[in-house]
Image: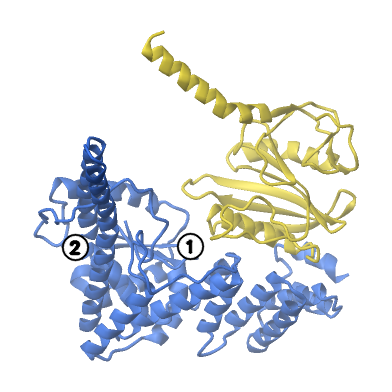
Amino acid sequence: MTKINRITLAAAAIGLACTAPALAGNKLIPQGQPVAVAKSPLTITPDHEWNKMGARPGRNSETWTLDGDGLNDVTFYGGIESGRTLFREVSKKNKPLPRFAATMLLTDIPALFENSYSIALDTQLMKIEGVTPTTFLGAKGVHFAYSFSRPDEEVRRKGEASAAIIGGRLYMITFEAPNVYYFDRDIAAYRAIVASAKMGAAPSAR
Amino acid sequence: MRWLVPLAAAALLSGTTPAEAKDVMPVLPPYAGAYQPQTVDERGLWMVADETERAMRDSKTVIHDAALNQYVRDVVCRAVGTDRCTGVRIYIVRQAAFNASMAPNGMMVVYTGLLLRVRNEAELAAVLGHEFAHFELRHGLRGYKHERTASDIFAWAGVLAAGAQTYGTARTYQSVQISAVGSVYSYNRDLERQADFLSMQYLKSSPYDPNCFGDIWTRAMDEADATARGRKQRSKRYDRVAFFATHPTDLERTLYLRQAATEMGKKGEDDQDRFSAALAQWRPQFLADQLKLNDFEGTDYLIGELGRAHWTADLLFSRGELYRMRGNPRDLVSATTFYRDAIAQDPANAEAYRGLGLAQLRSRDAAGGDALKKYLAMRPDAPDAAMISTLVQ
């Protein structure tokens, strides 16, 4: 084996070792079958196929996408407990995230979400645009729209979220996508997911 | 780009020169009309800065309001003189952090967090004068050259250490490397001191009071202490310079700036009223941005400092929001008081009614419904009107 071949092989091996866990984590969610999400009783019956991302935003959450992370992301927050952050801390020492409290009113949820995003993304351009009451998972819930830009990129993203506090835990499903093309195309698919969301044990397909 | 306060130090791969390399600097000042960069290094730096500035100009984070931009420009001009300030473009960036920066090509970036924290025009002039001093003294170019020489020394000492015959020789080369690294940072601190002193010179020949520059750093220390306390962290030390510190400590700056001001013996204006008038419209937004940082103690200190002279309605409202957001039962009681005081001063403040109502509801006080009804009556088209109305029933 020539030296160059050995190096190429070694590089390929390292590359495989690095990408393998992430690849293994991504998974196709089949159409029409109820599936429990975010390590919680939150159960979805998707009306078409989705891809589950291997990387979770936090302990009790998971992200689905159609075309890839950042293009159309549906994120499930499956029962955030009191005293916990919405997602993983970006820098616990320098920029700690605000924590959910079971005593919060539903109107506090959009503010919690806004502050968490502002801190995590280091942007003041996160905006909540409309807050309306809704029924979510059979409970009184809150629905809100939002928009933001990540730092160092000028893509404007739009989002929608539905949330409810059930048994002192926060359940929420969000959707976000670039406002050009993807948001308008895929918002219906997200709303279908929210409409199908139920609480209860699903036949475990995972 | 040179910053007012240290940002996270970039990954360090460079070192320094113990003996300062021959520093060939262009003669013309960089603020002279249509100045073109002279040397190959300066041209390179300006090219990079021009590219950054192009992106900055189109960034959504920049506040383009003509009146605010004109005001900040006027302050710079009053501070450094109208002959100098024409060489500067100012970008006001919506960022809650306390900072400002200057690029080698004359791009000045001012964070809204700075505008929120300075108490008067003289303080703003002192900070912007410091940034301008970096530009006038070509600190970008000097720092870059110094870093390059240091990285050369670092690399060659590494080669020599690898080939050293004895352990002692290798150790010597390694300590050369360490001192090369250290000198980059200590050189940086020297440049910051230079900029501080030149800013004091500007203040001397400006209408402003030079005594105010030291005050900024005293409050910066107190705010950092409050933040640390709230996050249950150790307070940063001000009496010792860290190896990697890019700036002198706030304590050191306070002391030498106070001393310089005393020696100058000049009194001046602080132009508090003009500053307050120009910023009045903006302060609620800057306060709202600050509230999002999830820094209870630091923000409470900051609001308290701003309210030292007079607790205005916007400060009381922000303090109410801060306490309501933390949401301990006692915080909700305090928040209720702050909102009521804000409403007493400004009965048209619909948002204060909203906060009051929500704080009361969260404390299981049914009176919250009445406050929310007032809010809805005042702002029927509020984005959260539908949601709030469900709480009223």
Discs 2, 1: same chain: yes
Q: Which mark is residue A166?
A: none
Residue displayed at 24% across by 46% down: B168
Q: Foreground residue, A57 or A29?
A: A57
Q: Quadrant of residue B80?
A: bottom left
Image side of residue A38 versus residue A88, left or right: right
Q: Foreground residue, A135 or A4?
A: A4
- The quarter of the image holding the C terminus of chain B is bottom right
Nearer-N-terminus badge (2/1) = 2
Task: Identify the subunit bearing mark 1.
Answer: B
Hey, what amino acid is under mark 1?
Answer: Gln
Position of residue A59 measured from the top left corner of the image (x, y, whole percent): 72, 46
According to the colouring, which chain is blue?
Answer: B
Image side of residue A171 versus residue B158, left or right: right
Q: How many marks?
A: 2
Position of residue A5 measured from the top left corner of the image (x, y, whole percent): 41, 12
Hey, what amino acid is under mark 2?
Answer: Tyr
Q: Color of chain A here? A: yellow
Asked if residue A187 can be seen in this view, the reply is yes
Q: Foreground residue, B56 or B48?
A: B48
Q: Quadrant of residue A182?
A: top right
Task: Identify the subunit bearing mark 2.
Answer: B
Q: How many other residues sit within 10 Å of disc 1, few (<14), some (14-19) or many (≥20)? A: many
Residue displayed at 33% across by 61% down: B246
Residue displayed at 57% across by 73% down: B229
According to the image, label 2 marks what residue?
A: B31
According to the image, label 1 marks what residue?
A: B95
Label 2 or label 1, whichever lies nearer to me, is 1
